[in-house]
């Protein structure tokens, strides 16, 4: 069994390693992985040395940063990010982020949007795998501008084992928050499973958002093979590997744990340009429309699916006509373009703003799979997809 896990894990690291190569739009491929620290993925600020101008919690917002030219608070200019005071004493500012689940990190993006005369000139990122006892040592936090950590809070945090903090990105210059320079991407090559991150600003200043890309690394030894789990969930290590279109929303949103918070928190494609003026349904009622959009996910563990939920929450005028679901037990030695996908669920018509539940009776029989392909026709938006199933041990099949 161990052999299977290690082998699958090595394959996974190799294919994720390929993701550090750049893409056409200039962002590195690792930026397609899950956003581990974001608010909607359960990331949380547990400590910040200073929140004078703007709270560290803003770093984890899912939304794009905004600038409000005329908005001032009692403490200075309102900023959509984390901004500390100009330091007049030694030291530097830092914040600690708790990840919802222990994770592997492949890259980060430090977004300095709108911080121009006040951006942090240098930063670094550290990470640690803290025990539950250590995690409890952070003082109770309340996000409040115009405040800073006091002496006793600093002392309390210093009790956490400092040996545990490994450097993921060493002290590096940042660029100012102008449109062309705001996105600062960095690969992370340090392997490990981390529960907490420490963002350091040298010496002080502002950062709009911190995006942390990677995947959750569950302890599979803890999961029983007859236990039903959501095999599609990002919290169980699943990641989106590729997709045809993500114009309004990335398919990785589909695999978040909580229900969607709005239309932006789902997978939404652009309207296809080849839409015909009149659509004809076939005998089954499924529209015969040209074109479709697809997304492929690599499961956190090989598994068999028993039931599926497709949630079109918030997609009312733009839900897809239908969805088809396929799976494959991928041969790691084969080019992914040659995988033979098997149908798990034939096209099913969807309705607006609704959770659709499909039981085993609605699914075709198939074996264990490593990857899932969702195909929506012709285009539109879906909020979440969940697939309950159990993990399988398939060393024989992978050999
Ligand atoms: N105009 C500013 O942004 N000034 C200061 N920052 C805020 N947010 O007021 C500063 O000194 O960095």
Image: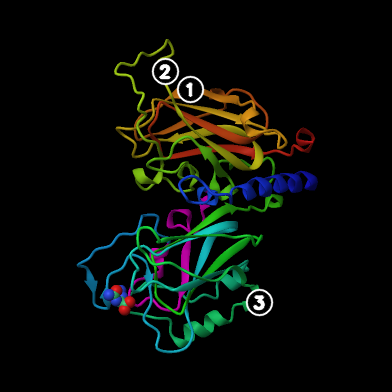
Residue 165 x/y as whole percent:
61, 72
Taking depth in this image into account, of 227 and 181 the one nearest to the observer is 181
Taking depth in this image into account, of 120 and 253 the one nearest to the observer is 120
**Does 391 sit left or right of 59 as displayed?**
right
**Does 35 sit left or right of 368 as displayed?**
left
Residue 347: assigned label = 1
| Residue wearing tag 3 | 163
Taking depth in this image into account, of 304 and 26 the one nearest to the observer is 26
- Quarter of the image for the C terminus: give it: top right
Seen in the picture, residue 350 relative to 41 is either above or below; the reply is: above
Magenta range is 33-59
Quarter where residue 396 is shown: top right
Q: Which residue lies furthest to the left in this view?
A: 70
Taking depth in this image into account, of 335 and 323 the one nearest to the observer is 335
Residue 286: assigned label = 2
Residue 125 x/y as whole percent:
54, 68
State if disc 2 and disc 3 touch (CB < 8 Å): no
Question: Which of disc 1 and disc 2 is earlier in sequence?
Answer: 2
Question: Alpha carbon of mark 3 to alpha carbon of mark 2: how far?
Answer: 60 Å
Residue 278: assigned label = none
Residue 208 x/y as whole percent:
38, 64
- Quarter of the image for the N terminus: give it: top right
Seen in the picture, residue 344 relative to 179 is either above or below; the reply is: above
Quarter where residue 249 is shown: top left
Query: For numbered disc 2, what is the local secondary structure?
Result: loop
Magenta stretch contains residue 46: yes
């Amino acid at each position: 069994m161990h052999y299977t896990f290690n082998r699958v894990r090595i394959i996974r690291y190799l294919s994720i390693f390929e993701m550090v190569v750049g893409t056409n739009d200039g962002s590195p491929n690792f930026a397609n992985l899950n956003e581990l620290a974001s608010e909607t993925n359960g990331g949380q600020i547990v400590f910040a040395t200073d929140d004078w101008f703007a709270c560290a919690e803003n770093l984890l917002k899912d939304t794009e940063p905004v600038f409000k030219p005329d908005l001032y608070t009692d403490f200075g200019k309102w900023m959509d990010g984390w901004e500390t005071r100009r330091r007049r004493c030694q030291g530097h500012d830092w914040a600690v982020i708790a990840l919802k689940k222990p994770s592997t990190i492949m890259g980060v993006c430090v977004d300095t949007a709108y911080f121009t005369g006040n951006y942090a000139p240098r930063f670094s990122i550290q990470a640690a795998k803290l025990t539950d006892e250590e995690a409890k040592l952070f003082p109770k936090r309340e996000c409040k501008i115009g405040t800073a950590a006091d002496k006793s809070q600093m002392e309390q945090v210093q009790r956490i084992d400092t040996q545990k903090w490994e450097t993921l990105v060493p002290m590096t210059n940042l660029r100012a928050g102008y449109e062309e320079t705001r996105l600062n991407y960095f690969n992370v090559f340090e392997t490990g499973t981390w529960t907490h991150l420490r963002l350091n600003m040298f010496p002080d200043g502002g950062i709009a958002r911190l995006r942390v890309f990677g995947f959750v690394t569950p302890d599979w030894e803890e999961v029983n093979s007859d236990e039903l789990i959501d095999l599609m969930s990002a919290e169980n290590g699943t990641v989106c590997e590729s997709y045809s279109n993500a114009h309004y929303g990335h398919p990785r949103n589909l695999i978040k744990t909580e229900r969607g918070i709005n239309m932006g928190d789902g997978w939404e494609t652009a309207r296809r340009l080849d839409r015909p003026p009149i659509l004809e349904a076939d005998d089954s009622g499924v529209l015969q429309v040209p074109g479709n959009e697809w997304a492929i996910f690599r499961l956190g563990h090989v598994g068999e699916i028993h039931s599926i939920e497709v949630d079109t929450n918030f997609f009312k005028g733009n839900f897809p006509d239908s969805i088809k679901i396929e799976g494959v037990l991928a041969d790691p030695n084969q080019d992914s373009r040659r995988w033979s996908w098997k149908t798990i669920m034939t096209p099913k018509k969807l309705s607006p703003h609704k959770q659709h539940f499909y039981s085993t009776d609605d699914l075709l029989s198939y074996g264990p799979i490593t990857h899932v392909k969702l195909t929506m026709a012709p285009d539109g938006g879906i909020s979440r997809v969940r697939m309950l199933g159990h993990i399988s041990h398939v060393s024989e099949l992978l050999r």
